[in-house]
Amino acid sequence: MVGYGRVIAGIGLSGTNGCVDHNGGSGGDMATACPLFLFFSIRFKMLTDLYGRGVPRLLSASTIPIRKGGRVVYGARLESVCGETHRGFKSHPFRFGLKSMLFDIFKAVILGIVEGATEFLPISSTGHLIIVNQWLSLSGDVTKIFDIVIQGGAIVAVFFYFHKQLIPIGKNKGAVLHIWVKALIGTIPALILGVIAGESVQKALFHPFVVSVALIIGGIALIVIERTKRVHSIDSIRGLTYPTVILIGIIQCLAFIPGISRSAATMLGAMMLGASRKVSAEFSFFLAIPTILAAGVYSLIKSGMVFNGQEVAVLVIGSSVSFCVAWAVTALFMKYIKSHSFEWFGYYRIVLGMLVAGLLLFRVF
């Protein structure tokens, strides 16, 4: 193997500021590192230029500062420890040190609350995360991966809440398997679109203006459909036919437009096709499990992201908070819809959409 990449080999190298020159030059004394260093090296360095004079910071292979275009960035991952160059370096949203770690935990808790509270309600978690990410000054690929990972906590909460309907044991084994088959079939349209054009659609449409418009349109749709008198002939998951399930899955694809909300699309789609409010909500929850899991696993594999110990701890905290909040919100939501409509969620979406538009107008984004 040749060319392991040039990294810091000592402490106090003059002219380097503890950085790898990503533009091709060493900027000072450098040494060629071995794979053992890249995987296991932990060095203390007085990074006065980055962190202030006299403040030691823990420097590991996954957090090596790199000089790129006159500025310092952090490696979100080392895609190859044996290459001459390293691809995929991004500005790192997680910093190091006790105070910084506490702030990372604070951010994880906030994002966990937002994710758990909004993921399964017909109000769009995307719209809320845009505002929160702006407030916390979060951006970049690592933050997107973080949002995906903490969705896992919310999914586990749904599974445990509906465990009697989702675990195939006892007398209900046949009915439970029936639910899983329908949920998997309903996921197929989104999987196909996601693989073919999902990323392109997201990149083309992911903009605060699009989100604000989608929030408002979705809110109006919730109000109109709830006020429209229609016969709800489907009062159980068993009553959902396979063609109906496929149509709901196709409608779910509208959620590729940021701000539409997967939950809103599936709930409204099921109601338009004759399902009761309770059945629409339940099937939306069941459909979320394979859909979000598939999207999350696909995104993680495609990103090739590698997390260090601190990031894993932050992810666990965020996912745990998301789990607890999602459990409570799911229980309250299922109780709420027994005697209330989705209309108030429509009004909430309109207000949120106007808020996002206002923030965009005043150039907050």
Image (spheres, rainbow, N blue to C red):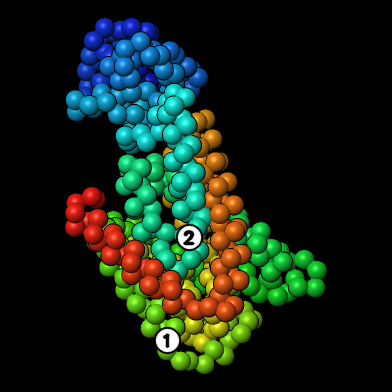
Dot 2 amino acid type? Glu
Q: Position of residue 290 (x, y in %)?
A: 55, 62
Q: In the drawing, does residue 182 fall left or right of residue 77?
A: right
Q: Earlier in the sequence, mark 2 or mark 1?
A: 2
**Which of the 4 image quarters holds residue 357?**
bottom left
Q: In the drawing, does residue 8 fall left or right of residue 239?
A: left
Up-down: is 180 above or below 130?
A: below
Up-down: is 150 above or below 256?
A: above
Q: Position of residue 202 (x, y in %)?
A: 32, 59
Q: In this rendering, does residue 293 appear at all?
A: yes
Residue at image mark 1: 227
The mark closer to the camera, 2 or 1, is 1
Q: In the drawing, does residue 232 fall left or right of residue 141?
A: right
What distance separates the C-alpha of mark 2 from that of mark 1? 24 Å
Q: Position of residue 295 (x, y in %)?
A: 46, 57
Position of the N terminus, as image quadrant, is top left
Q: Nearer the viewer, residue 213 or 254?
A: 213
Q: Residue at x 34, y 53 (%)?
A: 130
Q: Residue at x 66, y 59 (%)?
A: 160
Q: Residue at x 33, y 70 (%)?
A: 350
Q: Residue at x 40, y 77 (%)?
A: 222
Residue at image mark 2: 119
